[in-house]
Amino acid sequence: MSKSNTATATPEPAAEGKKSKKGLIVTILVAFLAIGAGAGGTWYFMKMSGGEEEAEPAKPKARPTTFVDLDIFTVNLQPEENNQYLQVGLTVKVTETDVVQEIAKQMPAIRNRILMLLSSKKAAEIAGIAGKQQLSQQIADEIKQTLSSEEQQEDVLEVLFTSFVIQ
């Protein structure tokens, strides 16, 4: 009996050694595959998120704005019932570029255009909020027409009323 026990005892350790070597190799292969898949997935998602950022256009930095005060304008309005006049104070909101100096240079032409525009209005046209907003846009357009380059025209953002009196 001892011979048969020893004969069966010896093959068992050899079989266990082969199984443990196979198990170790399989475990190592699975670990390498998991590490490779993790690295590949990380690379893929990093590339995808990086590609989206490059595809989006860069937002331009917000340029600082400034305000250019125009004198107070007093004009006769187009007659309706009685003679009426308009007294309005204006401020132009612009970006801080060379447009500020250009507006100063072109001030006589700008004032002339605004005076002509204001004197062509009737009191009823500009009495309401919508009329005032439209007038503001028209004044901005008149200012833009006096400026030479499109770049300077884009720098004129809006015209604001600092006073508005119809009498």
Image (tube, rainbow, N blue to C red):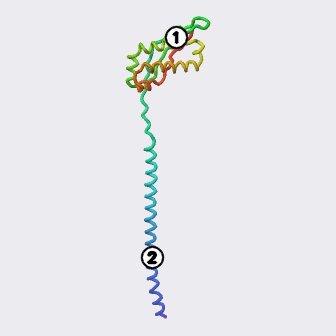
Q: What kind of residue is marked 2?
A: Ser
Point out the tag, 2 or 1, that comes first from the N-terminus. Answer: 2
The residue that mark 1 highlights is 119
For image coordinates 46% across by 90% down, the residue present is 7
Q: Residue 23 location, x and y as percent?
A: 46, 73
For image coordinates 44% across by 55% down, the residue present is 42
* Mark 2, secondary structure of its residue: helix
* Mark 1, secondary structure of its residue: helix
Q: Residue 17 location, x and y as percent?
A: 43, 79
> Which quadrant is home to the C terminus?
top right
Q: What kind of residue is marked 1?
A: Ser
Q: Residue furthest right?
A: 81
For image coordinates 52% across by 13% down, the residue present is 118
Nearest the viewer among 111 and 65 is 111
* Residue 33 versus residue 7 in the image, above or below: above
For residue 161, the mark is none
The image quadrant of residue 109 is top left
In this picture, residue 128 sits left or right of residue 50: right
Q: Residue 149 location, x and y as percent?
A: 40, 24
Q: Residue 33 location, x and y as percent?
A: 45, 64
The residue that mark 2 highlights is 20
In this picture, residue 123 sits left or right of residue 19: right
Nearest the viewer among 117 and 88 is 117
Crowding at mark 1 (Cα within 10 Å: few <14, some 14-19, many 20+) = some
Q: Nearer the viewer, mark 2 or mark 1?
A: 1
